[in-house]
Amino acid sequence: MNDKIDQAIWAHSRWKVHLKQAIETGQSDFTVETVQNPHACAFGQWLDSKEGKTLSHYSEIVELHQNFHQEAAHILSLALTAQKEDAASKVQLGSEFSHLTAKLVNKLADIGKSDDK
């Protein structure tokens, strides 16, 4: 289970890089629809599994994960529609996206630590 949590932390931490690239180029390998769907990423699919549903704080993780994907999709949408300044402001330190990323990653890290015991 810890491997899945570690992978989720890494993958969701990297989204800032993906979004910054989309803001700079106006292009992305991801569609807004795919990013918006929290069940489309590997972690979301695992969360939907029998094993994923055994996570402590499962419903809180699901909500944080969903909110993260909604905000990432919104920023990607701005980036892909040439609204660079708006999109860039939404990935800055202190932004909602920054807070959601931190909350999700920290909660997953806490669960990973408690599962190690």
Image: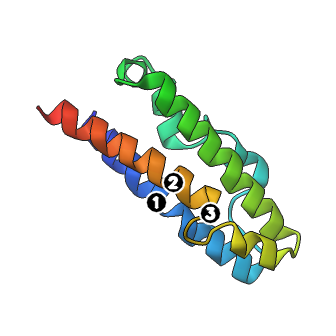
The quarter of the image holding the N terminus is: top left
Q: Which residue is mark 2?
A: 101
Tag 1–tag 2 contact (CB < 8 Å): yes
Residue type at mark 3? Ser
Q: Which residue appears at 36% of the width and 41% of the height?
A: 108
Q: Which residue is mark 3?
A: 95
Mark 3 or mark 2, whichever is nearer to me: 3
- Total numbered labels placed on residues in the image: 3
Q: Outermost residue toward the bottom?
A: 24
SS category of the residue bearing label 1: helix
Q: Residues within 10 Å of mark 2 (few under 14, many from 20)?
A: many
Q: Residues within 10 Å of mark 1 (few under 14, many from 20)?
A: some
SS category of the residue bearing label 3: loop
The disc label shown at residue 13, or none: 1
The answer to whether 104 appears left or right of 3 in the picture is: right
Q: Which comes sooner in the sequence, label 3 or label 2? A: 3
The disc label shown at residue 1, or none: none
